[in-house]
Image (spheres, rainbow, N blue to C red):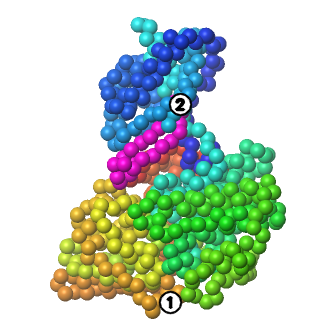
Amino acid sequence: MYLFTILAISLTGLAHAVPARKYLDAETYLAIDKVLNAFAFAVDERPVGSLDQIFAPDAWMDLHLAGSPQIGTESITAALVDLLPKFKTQHTFGTKSIVLHGDGTASCKTMFIGTFWGLGNKSFDWLQNYPMYYDRLALDEAGEWKITNKTLMYMRISPLSAALLNGVKNSTYIQGFELDDLHKDAPWHACSVIIPALFAAIEHDSGTSSAKHTGASFLLSAIVGFELGGRIGRALHGTDMLSRGWHSGAIFGPPAAAAAVSKQLGLSPRQIEDSFGTACTQSAGLMSAQFEAMAKPMQHGLASRNGLFAALLSRDDYTGIDKVFERHYGGYLDMFSQGTTLAPQNKPYEVIQELGEDWSSLQNISIKPYASMAGTHGPTDCIRNLQEKHPRHFQDPTQIKKVNVVQHKAWHGHGGQDITQPTTVLSAQMSTKYCIAAQLLDHAVLPAQFSAANLNRDQIWHLIAKVECDCDPSFDHSQRWATRVSVHFNDGTCLKGESEGPRTTHNPLSNVEIVEKYRRLADTCIDPARRARIEEMVLDIEGLEDVRDLGRALEARTRCCVT
């Protein structure tokens, strides 16, 4: 099953031998259908007090809620009463497959569209999914059908959909809270592109071939993708892509994902070049998607999906653009470097120079310490350092008069824009002003700072209004990570800080700190035993005989760590 997209499903009661079927007459069908519809009505319209008319007294239900499964009508009612006020729902039923068994019980598989409103920062934010209910029913003493067992099941989805969902930010998973990885020279988030494509490719291939996918082969394929993505980014001058308004990771990502999947599937050189050609023509992503839109979270996921798609096509001998990187008319590098003021326009030699010898592209991937866009990290570091050196001055944030931030044009354009209230999680994570205000107020820029309860606090917006962001034209490409910050206080004091680059890129988290970060975050959403099992497999991934074991450990239910 694909990483994170399939919930672990308990099928208690289904393992027993199923009695012979009986003829299902129209009257019985309608009676059972009425009960199933009554449950959906109770959930959508909220008369949950009627559940004792729907469920048997000792019924068993697993809708993947907290404390699931619920046993007994009282427990089922309590779980729904706790959950339902948080959002609105709508069931749209499709086919119901009702079977009447020889022992007088019945079962039903119901495909449906589940729609949820109010899951985001706006009342009209919505989500749709396509699950299935599996119900067991029996007649009570009065001859009325009651549900004895209800299980919510999620279906397997296509590899392309899995890569997209697992790669997307905010609306999905790996890059879900900006706490992922970053490349120093070529700003992209390698894991959110490469890892989903590889897991989806492995699951798809496992269903169509007998190939063995070990942890070692997975690791090697990931390295290939990480390495190529960084090299392509350097060939396009890295952060210059951001300065010109491109979402860089969505541009570098498709050929990198194609490379990783091609390696994992053992494609030939000819097929690999075809996959590059098909992946590169799907590269796209505008940085304006960060403003009032939902599209930005989707773009790394699209890069993952498109690279996987290209590799799967080339495996079946679908031809792609030949020599796609070096072509002048319509070629990848020449087209995406148009409009740059840097010379040379692009550097195709970066893609292959000292390949297999120079590993700096791979080594420049680091892990974020903050839950925000990379360009906010330098200013956040400067504020944090000043707080540590001058704690007395920062005890009362209301005494701050003004904060000035100066950065390279790439990061100023990306994060220095004005932000207005009310805002969204994504807009706040992209905003230098918001992140500085959060650090000043909370001494932290972590998921909690972007929760619904904290996002629109008056205190934080008073501080945001005091932050001014600017760019310094004298900062050249070699100074793209440099930051200067000055904090002015009501008493006339001015404290200044500067850095050549954030600790994210210039003093990366150590292996020990990365493990500590993983444990701290994982403990908020999964149980300690599962957290330890995942950690053990990741730290010894080259020893895994079947990397799908890691996928299975990752794919089960998680708790929401932010409210």
Where disc 1 sits, the SS reads loop
Percent from the top left, x then y, of residue 448?
Answer: 36, 59
Look at the image and tell me whether residue 333 can be seen: yes
Question: Residue beneath label 2, please?
Answer: 94
- Residue at image point 36% right, 70% down: 435
Where disc 2 sits, the SS reads strand
Neighbour tally class for label 1: few under 14, some 14-19, many 20 plus, Cα within 10 Å: few
Residue 291 belongs to magenta span: no
**Quarter of the image where one finds residue 556:** top right
Residue 123 belongs to magenta span: yes
The mark that comes first in sequence, 1 or 2, is: 2
**Quarter of the image where one finds residue 302:** bottom right
Magenta stretch, residue numbers: 114-133
Look at the image and tell me whether residue 184 can be seen: no
Question: Residue beneath label 1, please?
Answer: 476
Q: Is residue 438 above or below residue 339?
A: above
Amino acid type of the residue tagged 2 in the rendering:
Gly
Percent from the top left, x then y, of residue 506?
Answer: 51, 79
- Residue at image point 57% right, 68% down: 249
Total marks placed: 2
Amino acid type of the residue tagged 1 in the rendering:
Asp
Percent from the top left, x then y, of residue 411?
Answer: 45, 78
